[in-house]
Image (tube, rainbow, N blue to C red):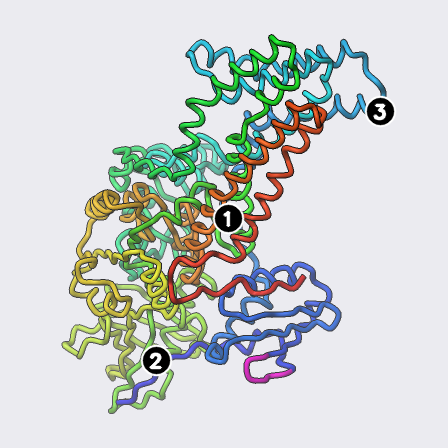
């Protein structure tokens, strides 16, 4: 019996680049489209920048060439990397989720209009001198929203930093310095607009909002009684509504087919990879993925009543994170300092010491620090987006560095290179080596297309010459599928019932290939942790994070895999339902913050409860769930430990910057009280410490501080600017 392993190779038939120079650790290729296509150059930079092991690269737009330096042991991965970087693939619009515009909120728009009016008045004052009465009246009107908020706080017997801000602006207007007050208002509006653009109410991290985000992320194609088609978000779907389902679409609700026929898989529901045919009258489970066909279906339950989401409707609130020393200091400051400063400012103003009163009212390092911290988080999110890492909200960046336990759903190991393919040719058959893999690759490609959801293994999508399949008749796999090729040959594919030796880390029983009653051999699909996962787990262990592996299958099936990932037997959890996954996260949260890497619908309650929910954006089957998680990873798990180190470094830098901002505010206040600087300079100089703090954050993100580990994470590769 011959044993053949499958090694991924680039599809030379479609490669549109040529190797110009191939030296050890250095490769130079030519791609003519790099000369004329800025879009391809941008795409190439993004792909290469997101590769953590690439040492450096340089794109020559004039010559249409690309030169890359790489570690010697990564030679086999370079060609696949170039395939991704040098070819633009069209996106399926049905898969794209359109996020709300950051400037679409009513509060944000109101703030922008308010700031725009302030800026317009300042511009007019600079061009033509406006009467002082007009400037004073306009400034008082623009101060009304802040005045109304302060009145509301005073009715609740609270003195806050907003009271100090209003007092500062009021003193400026009273001294005939309306323009200076407008500058202060414009700067404040810019900061507030930035905060409101990301700090919406829907970013609250409880189960109910996770369900809402799923309802917003998925769009249904609905048919009206008159035959008209309209697109509706999932949460607006109602019982009895007719929807159309096509290839590469999910059905996240219980539904029943009215007409047409589909081939679906329920891997997202329960991990079962086996495709099955669904015809008119058959039911669809929530989470089913259509891999071929087209049909209309009637919705039997809406998202608020579907049993698949029962646990999410119980509102499992995430625990409040443990406040840092800086946050505890700020809470104490907010309780004590505003009344003290208001009293001092009032006393100085009554004595006629206007400069001293301004110094008391302007001493507000807390607001600057909070604005600077938010700006640092937004900068980090923007930078990570360039690497195709999606972060849903700023708080996730900070929370990621606090986790002490990381729970990994078993299915996530498979979705990132975790299933290897081997064929075993029967000794008595006439089949040639590699033919069974080509047949399986052709079957998978016929079912899901070249770029569709992977049914068995991603390796099969990379086979250069799969058999051209014309038809697959799907039955129970134990009884056998009939596979017809375009050249007239046909085979039967069965799942083995024999007691053949189980492969390492069994996931599927071997698939037998028969032809005219003759057994040609078996194809084994072996679950092994991807090299990235092994390296990732080693780094996470060294950072003091405890890893847990959780799965629906028996715990005995996890032993070998968990051992390779250095996960102790006490942290291996098998045969876990959705409620048991939720309970595990709740128990671990008593010991510290918990991160959860999830993939199937059974992970949703645990993702909602975890301090940081992490999804995978690797294929059609994972795209929607990853879009509602706090953090979305791509196909490289090594980004996870790097992001944790970035988070810890940014938190450390923000705590350092609190002292910087406090000291600078103290100096500015003393200078104002002594009459050394004018009020306008007081307003403008407040931005300098923020600039220095932002530079400190950028340095912290580019060079994450050590966390005591003897291992180091790879830095970002140099970009071709």
The residue pinned by badge 1 equals 96
SS at badge 2: helix
The correct choice, above or below, for 693 with respect to 433 in the image is above
Report the residue at 38% width, 63% height from top.
Answer: 709
Mark 2 against mark 3, which lies toward the viewer?
Answer: 3
Q: Earlier in the sequence, mark 2 or mark 1?
A: 1
The residue pinned by badge 2 equals 436
Q: CA distance from mark 2 to mark 3?
A: 79 Å
Q: Quadrant of residue 235?
A: top left
Q: Which mark is residue 132?
A: none
The residue pinned by badge 3 equals 127
Please report the bounds of the magenta region as a residue range: 21-26
Q: Position of residue 421 (x, y in %)?
A: 33, 75
Q: Residue furthest right?
A: 128
Q: Earlier in the sequence, mark 2 or mark 3?
A: 3
The correct choice, above or below, for 288 with respect to 47 in the image is above
Mark 3 against mark 1, which lies toward the viewer?
Answer: 3
In the picture, measured across the screen, residue 167 lies left or right of residue 267, that is right
**Which of 552 and 427 lies nearest the eye of the viewer?**
552
């Amino acid at each position: 019996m011959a044993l053949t392993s499958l090694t991924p190779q680039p599809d030379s038939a479609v490669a549109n680049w040529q190797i110009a120079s191939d030296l050890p650790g250095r490769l130079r290729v030519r791609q003519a489209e790099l000369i004329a296509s800025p879009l391809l150059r941008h795409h190439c930079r993004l792909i290469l920048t997101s590769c953590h092991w690439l040492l450096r690269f340089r794109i020559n737009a004039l010559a249409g060439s690309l030169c890359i330096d790489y570690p010697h042991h990564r030679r086999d991965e370079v060609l696949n990397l170039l395939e991704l970087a040098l070819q633009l693939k069209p996106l399926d619009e049905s898969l794209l989720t359109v996020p709300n515009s950051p400037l679409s909120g009513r509060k944000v728009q109101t703030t922008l209009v308010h700031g725009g009016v302030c800026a317009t008045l300042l511009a007019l004052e600079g061009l033509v001198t406006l009467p002082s009465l007009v400037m004073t009246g306009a400034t008082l009107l623009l101060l009304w929203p802040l005045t109304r908020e302060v009145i509301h706080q005073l009715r609740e017997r609270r003195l806050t930093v907003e009271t100090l801000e209003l007092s500062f602006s009021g003193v400026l207007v009273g001294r005939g310095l309306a323009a200076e007050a407008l500058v202060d208002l414009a700067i404040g509006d810019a900061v507030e607009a930035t905060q409101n653009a990301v700090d919406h109410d829907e970013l609250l991290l409880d189960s109910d909002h996770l369900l809402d985000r799923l309802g917003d992320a998925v769009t249904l194609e609905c048919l009206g009684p008159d035959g008209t088609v309209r697109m509706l978000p999932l949460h607006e779907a109602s019982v009895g509504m007719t929807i159309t389902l096509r290839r590469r679409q999910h059905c996240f609700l219980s539904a029943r087919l009215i007409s047409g026929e589909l081939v679906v898989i329920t891997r997202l529901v329960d991990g079962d990879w086996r495709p099955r045919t669904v015809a008119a009258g058959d039911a669809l489970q929530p989470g089913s993925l259509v891999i071929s066909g087209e049909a209309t279906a009637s919705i039997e339950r809406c998202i608020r009543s579907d049993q698949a989401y029962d646990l999410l409707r119980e509102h499992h609130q995430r625990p409040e994170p443990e406040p840092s020393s800086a946050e505890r200091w700020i809470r104490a400051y907010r309780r004590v300092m505003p009344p003290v400063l208001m009293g001092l400012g009032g006393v100085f103003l009554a004595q006629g010491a206007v400069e001293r009163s301004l110094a008391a009212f302007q001493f507000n390092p807390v607001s600057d620090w909070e604005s600077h911290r938010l700006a640092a988080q937004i900068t980090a999110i923007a930078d990570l987006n360039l690497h195709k890492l999606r972060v849903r909200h700023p708080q996730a960046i900070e929370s990621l560095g606090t986790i002490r336990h990381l729970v990994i759903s078993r299915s996530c190991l498979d979705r990132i290179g975790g299933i290897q393919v081997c064929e075993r040719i029967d000794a008595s058959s006439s089949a040639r080596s590699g033919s069974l893999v080509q047949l399986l690759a052709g079957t998978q490609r016929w079912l899901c297309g070249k770029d569709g959801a992977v049914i068995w293994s991603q390796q099969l999508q990379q086979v250069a010459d799969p058999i051209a399949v014309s038809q697959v008749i799907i039955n129970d796999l134990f009884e056998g599928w009939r596979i017809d090729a375009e050249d007239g040959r046909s085979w039967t594919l069965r799942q083995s019932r024999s007691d053949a030796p189980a492969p390492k880390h069994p996931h599927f029983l071997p698939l037998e290939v028969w032809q005219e009653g003759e057994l040609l051999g078996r194809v084994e699909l072996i679950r092994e942790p991807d090299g990235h996962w092994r390296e990732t787990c080693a780094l996470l262990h060294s950072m003091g994070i405890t890893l847990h592996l959780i799965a629906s299958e028996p715990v005995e099936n996890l032993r070998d895999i968990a051992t390779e990932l250095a996960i102790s037997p006490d942290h291996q959890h098998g045969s876990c339902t959705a409620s048991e996954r939720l309970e595990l996260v709740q128990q671990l949260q008593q010991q510290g913050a918990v991160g959860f890497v999830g993939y199937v619908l059974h992970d949703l309650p645990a993702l909602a409860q975890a301090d940081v929910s992490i999804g995978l954006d690797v294929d059609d089957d994972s795209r929607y769930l990853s879009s509602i998680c706090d953090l979305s990873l791509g196909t490289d798990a090594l980004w996870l430990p790097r992001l944790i180190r970035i988070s810890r470094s940014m938190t450390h830098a923000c705590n350092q910057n609190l002292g910087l901002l406090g000291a600078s505010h103290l100096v500015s206040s003393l200078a104002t009280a002594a009459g050394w600087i004018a009020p306008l300079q007081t307003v403008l100089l407040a931005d300098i410490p923020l600039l220095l703090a932002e530079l400190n954050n950028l340095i912290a993100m580019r060079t994450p501080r050590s966390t005591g580990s003897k291992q180091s994470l790879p830095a970002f590769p140099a970009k071709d600017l």
